[in-house]
Image (spheres, rainbow, N blue to C red):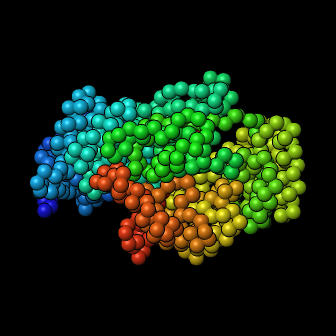
Amino acid sequence: MTFTITRFVSLGLSAGTSKASLRFFSPASPRCINTHPFSRPIRTPPRRLYSTTTIRTAKFFGSAVAGVVIAGGASLFFALEPSRDTGSPNPTVEAVVKVIPTAPQTGSEPIRNFAKALEDLQAEFPESSIVSTDPGELYAYAQSAYSQFVGSPHTIVVHVRSTEDVVKVVKISNRYLVPIVPYSGGTSLEGNLSAPASGSICVDLSALDKIISINESDADVVCQAGVTWNNLNETLKEKGIPLFFPLDPGRDATIGGMISTGCSGTNAVKYGTARGEWILNATVVLPSGEVIKTRQRARKSSAGFDVTKLFIGAEGTLGIITEATLRLAPVLPSTVAVAQFLDIRQATNAVCDILNHGAALQCVEIIDELTIKVLNQFGTSARKWPEKVTLFFKFQGSDDAIQETSRYVESAIAKHGATDYQLASNEQESEDIWQDRRNALFACLAYRPGCKGWITDVCVPVSRLPDLISAAKKDFEELGLVAPIAGHVGDGNFHALVLYADDAELALVREAVGRINRKAIELEGTCTGEHGVGTGKRNYLLTELGEGTVTLMRTIKQTMDPHNLFNPGKLYPDVSPPSDTNALTEGHAISNTKPASSKS
């Protein structure tokens, strides 16, 4: 039975409400794949909300759900929608309160009970800053800085400080059958942080941000899940240790999140992805509350199958990662070069030729002619680029090795029609050229002021990339969409930033993205090269992986998490895929804000 209570409340920010939700959607905040403007939501002392008397909410985004409270044994969800009274200078919102009572108990079976879970959590963590039911926090911790997906708020947020804290939360979750959603950096792209319809406990791991030990002689580091990759590398540099962690997704992505989504980045052509050998082991809290360490710190092991990889890409559905041992790589001198081509196919064929002959490339990025055009218009570059398809190379090694690689690359790409090859003459010029690659996103957003952007993420065998990009460009043209393209051509992964200004264009964007995902799978590729599955891509997995593989994934999930408490509704596709997967495709809106500076 569902009871619905309707009231009108003023739109505002109460004195006790967390400012976290505002941080995620402030129009003045720059948002970029490689420049994350927020470290984590601001914490405020929790407020226990056991009534529906006066609720003033934080600023809402669209028609987002903005508050959840506990009443008796039921979850109360406040869905905020704009008031029809548009003439008021202080707009109001309608709070629809849905009371969802717990199911009747049969025998001695446990029942889902958020109220009892909250009582036990507050008893286990008596400090006022640990357990929160503040509506602003419940909402903010369900959102990502980058995703268009507006997450449903959690019922409770717990700011854990250790693996032992996570175990306590998991045991309470099991006791009352309350779902858990992990949070660390808030930079995911596919709706990974949203609460399920039943509500959830959000386990905030962002305070687990300690580097436990740096083993320079062994070239590895032990750290907690909330450490960000860029802070890790900056710490190594500050200590004078000539090593770095080479996986480089969006800035401020955390180690736990990177492992959970199987991330990569621009360095993948040289160093691979999180699914390689960079994660030596992980400490994981299982759905039962048991803590395991997947293996020892040795560089290699033949002791059974690799349990660590079971959790890479599992998106928190099989366990919560709290620590990891990471392999490090030596820092080598590097410089960059650029070259232009008449079309995508020529550029891709040149890259295949170079890679198959063993050239020492750290990165090779592709930008289409539209992106180059908007970069020129953006006005931050010191140079005017030819409006052609452009490859950005990063060479690595000694000066002699770099010069030798450069000579080979220049000769090889000339056979594929390359023009205007330039090798940076010094470190500053190298940084300036690569900065233009980083600024591509901001330049593309500025091309249509006021627009949002939907980021695609598909990957195919490198030789099939021209077919996929050509098909995507044809779809964009047919649907009348503007979509600059950039990508990691060295591993067949590209992103289109599809711009849209209103709901009508958004519908066209969904159609285009659905076509691109299906085309990538048709070309023996994947609908998600590095952003993960979440809720946005899960119903493409049956087509991509096949029923047998998906059934095995479900079997593993059911065996490890029989009550489906860990991040439910993510990753695993429905038993029968919907007829229209376009409707389930996730978009990623990023505001049109010009950066003051950008580094990655």
Question: Is residue 214 positioned above or below 444 on the image?
Answer: above
Image quarter (top left, top right, bottom left or bottom right) of the C terminus: top right
Residue 326 visible to the viewer: yes
Of 354 and 52, the residue lying toward us: 354
Image location (x, y in percent) of residue 453? 52, 58
Residue 436 visible to the viewer: no
Residue drawn at point x = 68 percent, y = 29 percent? 242
In the visual, does 145 lie left or right of 361? left
In the visual, does 52 lie left or right of 356? left
Question: Is residue 534 positioned above or below 324 on the image?
Answer: below
Which quadrant of the structure image shows residue 498?
bottom right
In the visual, does 199 lie left or right of 61? left
Residue drawn at point x = 15 percent, y = 57 percent? 103
Image location (x, y in percent) of residue 160? 35, 34
Image quarter (top left, top right, bottom left or bottom right) of the N terminus: bottom left
Image location (x, y in percent) of residue 298? 59, 35
Residue drawn at point x = 55 percent, y = 54 percent? 530
Question: Is residue 249 positioned above or below 293 on the image?
Answer: below
Q: Residue furthest top?
A: 239
